Amino acid sequence: MCGIVGIVGHNAVAPLIVDALKRLEYRGYDSAGVATVEQGTLGRRRAEGKLVNLERLLGAEPLAGTIGIGHTRWATHGVPNETNAHPHFSNGVAVVHNGIVENFATLRDELIADGYVFTSQTDTEVVAHLVARELARGVAPVEAAHATLKRLEGAFALAIMFEGDENLIVGARSGPPLAVGHGEGEMFLGSDAIALAPFTNSITYLEDGDWAVIRRGGAEIFDLSGKRMERKRQTSLGTVFMVDKGNRRHFMEKEIHEQPEVISHTLAHYLDFTTDGLKPLDLPFDFKTLERLAISACGTAYLSGLVGKYWFERLARLPVDIDIASEFRYREMPISKNSAAFFISQSGETADTLASLHYCRSQGVPIGAIVNVRESTIARESDVVLPTLAGPEIGVASTKAFTCQLAVLASLAVRAGVARGTISREREKELVHQLSETPRFANQVLKLEGQIETLARDLSRYNHVLYLGRDTNFPLAMEGALKLKEISYIHAEGYAAGELKHGPIALIDENMPVIVIAPHDRIFEKTVSNMQEVAARGGKIILITDQKGASQVSLKTYETIVLPDVPEIITPMIYALPIQMLAYHTAVFMGTDVDQPRNLAKSVTVE
Ligand code: F6R
């Protein structure tokens, strides 16, 4: 992951680099650093932990210079301390890096044998030494960088700067994204266009395998063989404004509460509420003749896809293969001719999801991207972008992007059903109308926050929690567990309720709260039987249900959260809210860093 920035500018660049890094902190926050060249000499400041530590250091020990590179780190090789923080130096060469140099061990042994001394545990340091070794052999800086790139294997975005040259940064991309920003007599490099938004909206995205020579006068782009490449400039839509928390304590809290609005925007992109019908959508395939749909994604996005599978299969009789992208990319799944593939990603940069997309591309399958970041790599590499209109999601734990992904998938499933003749015009109207009710019900559910907060205080005393659900509530059970563990660090598991007696029931005792997600649906009674099994073994049941469900359950629960009775198609979006609020408030009681939980990053650009 990690975020990188480079500026060849007019004024002191260190504060500008820090400003850009703030927009990239979602990519990692283990350490940060900046290096500049001033009067021919390299200088750097690095600090362990979040960017604010680097900012403080720069306040005490400022760094002059009108050219510089910066980095915010998500540790892959080496613990997150100052020594492992980027930029890395070697004899007049400074490097920042996002990604992994996979052959670093071989290169390091070669360099050590050549007398190079390693001061960090990172893979990045080999890049600095390799460039420095070329320079020591009398090779000019640009050629030295090019020779080094040819030696690297893996996935990386790099910015390389040279002592003695205040008008040169070399950038390179093999895998993770890198954008070149064009200014007036100044140039920029950044992991994404948003990072560069305060400086320029004129952007060239490097393509995989590109490297670029950046000077104040412009950028020259080459491929690995050294051939000059033409890449088009585009106007970025990236916003200059930093998103703030408003009057909320955390971004996550704000994002949870934004859901009625952003779900409504997202649905309105696909559905026409004046006619209760579908808006026109240009797809690179025809749902009518499609034989299979492959969906691939990671984490929370994967779980939205899993809900989507139930919808596509039930509403449109369209078989869906759904995979975790890190598995799909190596699974060599045979893809039949009449298939399409959807990739779901908030960031649009997730390495495994992108690699899965590349696999489907190689199989000639039409590709749709359900993404939140419209200018992301996954969006750019797809045949059709199916946007979630969640707005920037800053909290590392995904909330509003998840429910907006669900909104897109539900809308697409209805569309597929209409195209395939499994949904009549009357049913289409009914479903679209039901979907239009989501924001209203979501608002009602958010009002239950007080009850959920009180429950969260109790939950924060436990070390393990089990979530159960059936049908579309099974992915939600997994999502509830994922949310809780990632921000509160309480161990949690999500299971299909019917699986309980095949193993997990052995865990049930009074120290294991069991959160059951069970609206009153066709299989409600089945879930009630599972609750009986838990109750019989002394388990503490927290039931999330609707009014009908609550009125029909006779067994004693530890707590029952009663949501409004809602149409079946919108239950996943509605039931996502209490599980998000429960995780959020539990984490607040635990005192964790809710928006930037340990070891995580918002955008996972390494596999
Ligand atoms: C969990 C979470 C992650 C992401 C996953 C995929 O709250 O946010 O599990 O869903 O890393 O990220 P994207 O959607 O950016 O591909």
Image (spheres, rainbow, N blue to C red):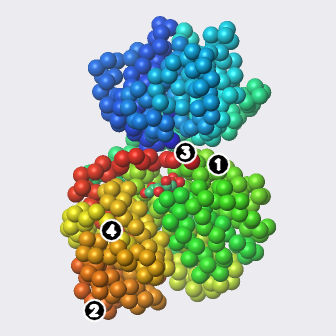
Secondary structure under badge 2?
Answer: loop
Expressed as whole percent of the image width and height from the top left, the position of residue 340 reads: 70, 65
Rounded to the nearest whole Å, what is the CA distance between mark 3 and mark 4?
A: 30 Å
At label 3, counting other C-alpha atoms closer than 10 Å, the crowd grade (few under 14, some 14-19, many 20 or more) is many
Rounded to the nearest whole Å, what is the CA distance between mark 2 and mark 4?
A: 23 Å
Left/right of residue 562 with respect to residue 21 in the rendered view: left
Residue 231, visible in the rendered structure: yes
Rounded to the nearest whole Å, what is the CA distance between mark 3 and mark 1?
A: 16 Å
Expressed as whole percent of the image width and height from the top left, the position of residue 501 reads: 43, 82
Q: Return the disc, 3 or 1, that comes first in the chain's sequence.
A: 1
Q: Which residue is mark 4?
A: 465
Q: Is residue 40 above or below residue 431?
A: above
- Evaluate if marks 3 and 4 touch, with contact meaning CB atoms under 8 Å apart: no
Secondary structure under badge 3?
Answer: loop
Left/right of residue 226 with respect to residue 90 in the rendered view: right
Q: Quadrant of residue 262?
A: bottom left
Residue at the image point whose x is 58% and y is 87% from the top: 426
Please state which amino acid type lies under the numbered disc 3: Thr
Q: Is residue 14 above or below residue 4?
A: above
Rounded to the nearest whole Å, what is the CA distance between mark 1 and mark 4?
A: 40 Å
Q: Return the disc, 1 or 4, that comes first in the chain's sequence.
A: 1
Secondary structure under badge 1?
Answer: helix
Residue 443, visible in the rendered structure: no
Q: Which residue is mark 1?
A: 380
Q: Return the disc, 3 or 4, that comes first in the chain's sequence.
A: 4
Q: Which residue is mark 2?
A: 554
Closer to viewer: mark 3 or mark 4: 4
- Evaluate if marks 2 and 4 touch, with contact meaning CB atoms under 8 Å apart: no
Closer to viewer: mark 3 or mark 1: 3
Please state which amino acid type lies under the numbered disc 4: Val
Residue at the image point whose x is 37% and y is 65% from the top: 492
Q: Which residue is mark 3?
A: 605
